[in-house]
Amino acid sequence: MIELYSSDTPNGKKISIMLEEIGFSYKVIKLDLMKGDQFKPNFKKISPFSKIPVIVDHSNNKEAIFESGAILIYLAEKSNKFYDKLNKLKIDQWLMAQMAMVGPLIGQYHYFYHFNKGLSEIGEKRYFEVTKDIYKVLNEHLNKNKFLAGESYSIADIATWPWIARHHWHDIGLKNYPNLREWYELIARRPAVIKGYKFIDENSEIPKP
Ligand SMILES: N[C@@H](CCC(=O)N[C@@H](CS)C(=O)NCC(=O)O)C(=O)O
């Protein structure tokens, strides 16, 4: 059994979607980030930067793993799914691009535009441009590729999709990026994604483009 310490955020959803995809049994321990649960000493012991998600694998000596990219790799290797050894180099590149670019940069846009609108014109403007650029790069790449690492769905898609599932926060218009939209909708139809998306709030629905 796996314990998933998480919240209803894109980084949180990566792992619930992966656990649904590979069919591992898991128990969610919800953290209220607004109340500061992530800073409690017991959580800090398993998450040095006080961030969700973290998993604790009871079938592996209660191993605790932080950083969503590392968790995805761990679960992919354990299940032998969505991390094709023959395509590892491509998957790694798109996974790292998600971890270093898509998540942190769109996260800044959420900070300035969604949560603190009107407080920093330069912050809103800069991260709107950066977010538009990310959409453009993904859209162009998906013109020639069905999934981020080529023909097969992988942990790179699982890592990236929940960030695009926040498109309604971005005021960019996913419909303006047809290949990205098609990829988004294709993944949104997967039963594991539908289930993993609702892992905290049973009533939440995947946003339509
Ligand atoms: N690089 C980390 C980022 C995790 C992260 O930023 N988590 C956010 C929620 S999406 C968090 O825990 N925020 C709490 C805080 O910053 O206090 C990962 O991918 O696991």
Image (cartoon, grey):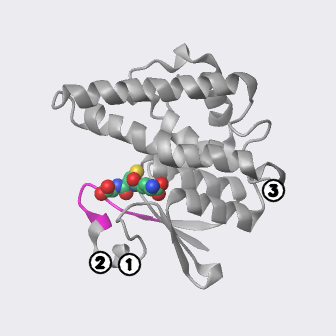
How far from the left and from the top, in percent, is residue 97? 56, 43
Q: Are marks 3 and 2 in contact (CB under 8 Å)?
A: no
Horizontally, residue 26 falls left or right of residue 151, namely: left
Q: Residue furthest right?
A: 86
Q: Are marks 2 and 1 in contact (CB under 8 Å)?
A: yes
How far from the left and from the top, in percent, is residue 88? 75, 52
Q: Looking at the picture, which amino acid does disc 3 mark?
A: Lys
Q: Does the residue labelled 1 lie within 8 Å of ligand 1?
A: no
Q: Ligand 1 shows up in which quadrant of the image?
A: bottom left
Horizontally, residue 175 falls left or right of residue 6, namely: right
Q: Looking at the picture, which amino acid does disc 2 mark?
A: Pro
- Mark 3, Cα crowd under 10 Å, few <14 / some 14-19 / many 20+, is few
SS state under label 1: loop
User: Where does label 1 land, which residue?
Assistant: 45
Please say if 132 is above or below 95.
above
Q: Quadrant of residue 177?
A: top right
Residue 202 appearing in the image: no
Identify the residue at horizontal 50%, vertical 35% (top origin): 165
Q: Quadrant of residue 118?
A: top left
Q: What whole-number distance in Å separates the C-alpha atoms at marks 3 and 2?
A: 38 Å
Callout in the foreground (3, 1): 3
SS state under label 2: helix
User: Where does label 3 land, which residue?
Assistant: 85
SS state under label 3: helix
How far from the left and from the top, in percent, is residue 209? 52, 22
Q: In the image shown, does 162 or 102 lie closer to the viewer?
A: 102
Looking at the image, tell me whether mark 3 or mark 2 is earlier in sequence order: 2
Looking at the image, tell me whether mark 3 or mark 1 is earlier in sequence order: 1
- Mark 2, Cα crowd under 10 Å, few <14 / some 14-19 / many 20+, is few
Identify the residue at horizontal 60%, vertical 51% (top origin): 17
User: Where does label 2 land, which residue?
Assistant: 41
Horizontally, residue 8 falls left or right of residue 35, namely: right
